[in-house]
Image (cartoon, rainbow, N blue to C red):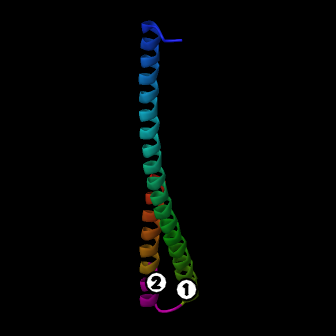
Amino acid sequence: MPLSMDQMEVLGKIEGKVSKLAEKVEALQTENVQLRQANEKLEAELKNERDLLGQLKDKLKGTQQALEKQRDGEPGHVQALRERVEESLKEVDACIEWLQKA
C-alpha cells in the first residue's frame, strides 16, 4: 500500500530527528574519548606527584632523624641539617598544595 503525503512527511521528520540524534551520539562519543584521555593524563600526573611526595616525606624523615642524632653535635652541622629540613618541608608543602588544587 503506497504511503500518503502526510505519512511521507511524518516519515521525513522522523528520519531528520534520527539523523540529528545520531550526530549528537557521535559528538558525545568523541567528547567522551577526549575526556577519558585527559583523565588518564591527570591520573598519571597525580601518581607522579604522589610518588614525589612520598620520596620527599622519606627524605624529610631521614633528615629529621639525622638532626635528632646530631643535636648534641657541632652547631654548624646542626644548622646545616636544619636548613635541609626547612628545604624539604618547603618541597613537601609545595607538593601538598599542588595536590589539593588538582
Q: Which residues are magenta?
A: 73-82
Q: Mark on residue 66?
A: 1
User: What whole-number distance in Å separates the C-alpha atoms at marks 2 and 1?
Assistant: 8 Å
Could you tell me the amino acid type at mark 1?
Ala
Circles 2 and 1 in contact, beta carbons < 8 Å: yes
Vertical order, 8 against 15 (above or below)? above
In the displayed structure, does residue 63 sit left or right of residue 94? right
Residue drawn at 52 percent across, 65 percent down: 47
Position of residue 89 measured from the top left corner of the image (x, y, whole percent): 46, 70
Question: Residue beneath label 2, please?
Answer: 81
What residue lies at 51% left-to-right and 69% top-to-bottom? 53
**Circle 2 — which element?**
helix
Q: Nearer the viewer, residue 38 or 28?
A: 28
Left or right of 33 on screen, residue 58: right
The residue under the point 41% across, 28% down is: 20
Residue 79 versus residue 39 in the image, above or below = below
Residue 29 picture location, percent across and down: 47, 43
Helix or strand or loop: what does disc 1 sit on? helix
Res 101 label? none
Residue 17 image offset from top left, x and y in percent: 44, 23
Q: Using a 10 Å C-alpha cutoff, classify the residue at mark 1 as few (fewer than 14 neighbours), some (14 to 19) or many (20 or more).
A: some
Task: Please state the horizontal and vertical placement of residue 46, each as a whole percent of the image.
Answer: 49, 61
- What amino acid does circle 2 point to? Leu
